[in-house]
């Protein structure tokens, strides 16, 4: 069979399967399954076998367990609360399952004699009970034999819409079993033989069969490994591609001059550049000099001194008669950067402007005009800087201070606008290796791995809210000795009004009680631009000793005399955010402190976050724990950016595998950039379908 006909067979709509009518097809489309091929990639959510189920006789109170048993009895019971119950039995005893809602639905769904796998938290209530358990229907009869023969039974993700048309776990099992029987031989292999051999990978048809119906766990593991390999490999292929395209674009800018202004600026700095800063600047300098567009990621922990590096790169661009842009994730951070940059850049005669949302129309128009004529040499703002109708005279350098919020898409956007400036992305917190190899895999990386000398590690502790008064007397003592402090309150979009009120109220109360002798300032996102600026200035000058704020100060605020950071409701913050906030202190030579105040009953995850903060100040370590706790999707808001999700590959664990895949992908793109070789055609085809969102980029390949 040729590749072409094979492809057509599994690219057929699921409607071509005999058991699939319009209703089922619609329900499947709702979970992204449209073709027979899609169906094969609808993976089980877990597997059931003898080793994973607990006999009813062995159940204990409070245990999370999966039980495999047959329905003996069922019905609706009226009472103080009406309920639907099932009585299940295995060889060792009876288990009752109870539902308090949708009684008639359940009553119709189940049949006596059916075998079910039920999971949940057991309560011993007379006998063992499960309330609202998760369940899978295994079969009408003979379910016991299924397990007793040592079979591994796949359990599928389902939901109401699917279950209503018969596609619960059992329905999927049947459907997949039949579809695989018939179409397994039509699944084309997509990886070149050479790569499969090198890494001992199962052929794709075998892997896809085994992931649904594994003969044993060994085979299941091999199947997963093969599919995980594919996931990483495709992503790295995309990245290898991008990188190749970038290095082949020769229409970048060559910044040849480094002159008096840079020298003056460096001389004016109140400190020596660290060895790390010099090394990183050297790398950036080389990129800027080359006529290929720079695409570099600058990773450095909070406080490692990235701003100075950015400033020098900006000045190099300006000295070569180009404009430079610094893009920050929030307006307040843009303002901060603006204040810092302007101070230093003006002293060497460079005109710096700020462009953000809160400005009046007149100011805005003046600034836009300055940008267009080139009078404004450096522009600081948010991502609106490249999205809106801002016209540059000669844009040469874009620095993106990313702080986990911008996606990979910014660079693509610049290109689309026909600009090809050098791009430097700075991350405010370290990124675990696997993520930097995927998300930022096409960037060259510079790492600032040391903090400027003379810094003492920040002492961190967390306290329960009952100790709040003690925490604040500690703060008062520090402040009376001449230090400054931050007190931060959480503010999230969903509860913005309440959060804001809590922060403002606390500020007022604190000013009257704990800190009646101190000068407090208040800072939050709802204040006007110039109000915020005034407060920040007063704090920087030392006129205010304590700054009460919402998370607006998360990044970029730089007041070396501030040595105490108190974070209220620390249990509500993510790890990265806590680490960022803590980075606002410990910037001078004084000992600094960070105290996290937690409220209420803490869940395990919150406790782990707080313990991690207290245990380490190493940003890489914190990022790794964060990734483990939250998973990659949340970690970066990756999902929002249309970045492919890994279902088989584990971004936390599979670093080794990722490296292998990366090497293979880069090698392949080197060999056959457009995947034109006969042996690479199936891959080429699959790849283009896999990354639908990147279709525009793929044009290059076609
Ligand atoms: P971040 O990497 O978090 O953006 P910053 O650029 O804000 O860090 O720098 C943190 C602090 O360290 C600032 O107060 C900055 O002036 C100071 N700093 C930067 N480089 C040095 C250096 N080489 N020696 C001493 N202090 C430095
Ligand atoms: Mg910074």
Image (tube, grey):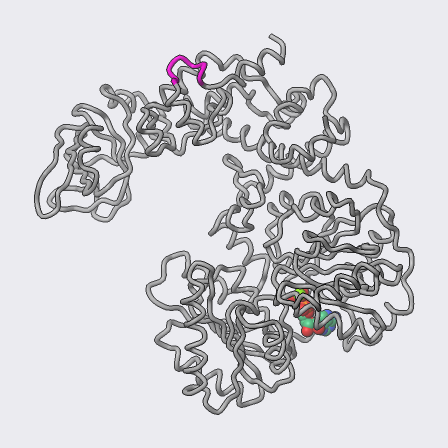
Single out the residue that lies furthest toward the bottom. 517
Residue 347 in the image: state x and y as whole percent. Answer: 82, 76
Single out the residue that lies furthest toward the top. 1
Q: Can I make out residue 306 in this image? A: no
Query: Which quarter of the rendering shows the N terminus?
Result: top right
Residue at horizontal 50%, vertical 64%? 613
Residue at horizontal 30%, vertical 20%? 149
Q: Is residue 94 left or right of residue 331?
A: left
Residue at horizontal 51%, vertical 89%? 518
Residue 404 in the image: state x and y as whole percent. Answer: 59, 55
Give the overall secondary structure of the magenta segment. loop
Q: Compared with residue 355, is residue 453 higher up or lower down, i.e. above or below? A: below
* Residue range corresponding to the magenta coloring: 15-21
Q: Is residue 663 left or right of residue 317?
A: left
Q: Can I make out residue 662 in this image? A: yes
Single out the residue that lies furthest toward the front. 362
């Amino acid at each position: 069979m040729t590749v072409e006909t094979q492809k057509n067979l599994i690219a057929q709509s699921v409607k071509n399967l005999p058991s699939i009518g319009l209703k089922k097809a619609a329900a499947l489309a709702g979970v992204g399954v449209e073709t027979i091929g899609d169906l094969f990639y609808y993976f089980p959510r877990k597997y059931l076998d003898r080793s994973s189920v607990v006999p009813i006789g062995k159940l204990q109170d409070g245990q999370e367990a999966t039980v495999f048993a047959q329905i003996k009895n069922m019905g609706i019971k009226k009472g103080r609360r009406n309920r639907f119950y099932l009585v299940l039995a295995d060889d060792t005893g009876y288990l009752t399952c109870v539902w308090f809602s949708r009684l008639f639905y359940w009553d119709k769904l189940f049949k006596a004699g059916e075998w079910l796998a039920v999971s949940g938290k057991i309560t011993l209530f007379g006998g063992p009970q499960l309330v609202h358990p998760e369940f899978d229907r295994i079969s009408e009869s003979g379910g016991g034999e299924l397990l007793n023969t040592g079979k591994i039974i796949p359990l599928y993700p389902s939901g109401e819409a699917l279950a209503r048309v018969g596609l619960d776990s059992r329905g999927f099992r049947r459907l997949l079993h039949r579809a695989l029987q018939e179409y397994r031989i039509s699944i084309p292999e997509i990886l070149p033989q050479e790569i499969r051999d090198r890494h001992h990978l199962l052929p794709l048809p075998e892997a896809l069969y085994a992931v649904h119906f594994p003969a044993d766990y060994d085979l299941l593991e091999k199947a997963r490994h093969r599919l995980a390999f594919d996931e990483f490999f495709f992503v790295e292929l995309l990245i290898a591609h991008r990188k190749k395209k970038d290095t082949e674009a020769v229409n970048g800018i060559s910044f040849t001059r480094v002159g008096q202004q840079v020298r003056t600026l460096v001389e004016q700095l109140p400190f020596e550049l660290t060895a790390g800063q010099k090394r990183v600047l050297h790398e950036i300098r080389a990129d800027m000099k080359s006529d290929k567009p720079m695409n570099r990621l600058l990773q450095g922990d909070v406080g490692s001194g990235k701003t100075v590096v950015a400033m020098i790169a900006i000045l190099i661009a300006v000295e070569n008669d180009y404009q430079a842009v610094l893009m920050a994730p929030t307006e307040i951070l843009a303002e901060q950067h603006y204040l810092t940059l302007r101070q230093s850049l003006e002293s060497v005669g460079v005109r710096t402007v700020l462009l953000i949302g809160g400005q009046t129309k007149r100011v805005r128009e003046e600034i836009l005009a300055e940008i267009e004529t080139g009078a404004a040499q450096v522009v600081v703002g948010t991502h609106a800087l490249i999205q809106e109708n801002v016209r540059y005279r000669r844009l040469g350098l874009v620095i993106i201070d990313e702080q986990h919020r911008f996606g990979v898409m910014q660079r693509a956007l610049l290109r689309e606008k026909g600009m090809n400036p050098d791009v430097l992305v700075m991350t405010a917190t370290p990124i675990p290796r696997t993520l930097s190899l995927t998300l930022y895999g096409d960037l060259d990386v510079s790492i600032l791995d040391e903090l400027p000398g003379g810094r003492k590690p920040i002492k961190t502790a967390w306290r329960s809210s009952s100790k709040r008064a003690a925490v604040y007397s500690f703060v008062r003592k520090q402040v009376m000795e001449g230090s400054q402090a931050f007190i931060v309150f959480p503010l999230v979009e969903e509860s913005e009004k309440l959060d804001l009120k809590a922060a403002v109220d606390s500020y007022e109360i604190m000013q009257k009680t704990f800190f009646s002798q101190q000068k407090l300032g208040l800072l939050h996102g709802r204040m006007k631009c110039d109000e915020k600026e005034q407060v920040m200035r007063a704090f920087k000058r030392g006129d205010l000793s304590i700054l009460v704020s919402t998370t607006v100060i998360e990044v970029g605020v730089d007041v070396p005399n501030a040595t105490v950071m108190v974070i209220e409701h620390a249990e509500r913050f993510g790890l990265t955010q806590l680490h960022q906030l803590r980075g606002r202190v410990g910037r001078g030579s004084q000992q600094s402190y960070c105290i996290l105040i937690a409220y209420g009953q803490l869940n395990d995850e919150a406790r782990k976050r707080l313990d991690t903060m207290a245990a380490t100040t190493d940003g890489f370590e914190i990022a790794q724990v964060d990734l483990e706790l939250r998973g990659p999707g949340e970690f970066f808001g990756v999902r929002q950016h249309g970045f492919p999700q890994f279902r088989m590959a584990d971004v936390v664990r599979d670093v080794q595998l990722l490296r292998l895949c990366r090497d293979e992908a880069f090698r392949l793109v080197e060999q056959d950039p457009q995947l034109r070789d006969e042996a690479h055609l199936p891959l080429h085809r699959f790849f283009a379908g896999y990354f639908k969102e990147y279709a525009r980029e793929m044009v290059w390949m076609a």
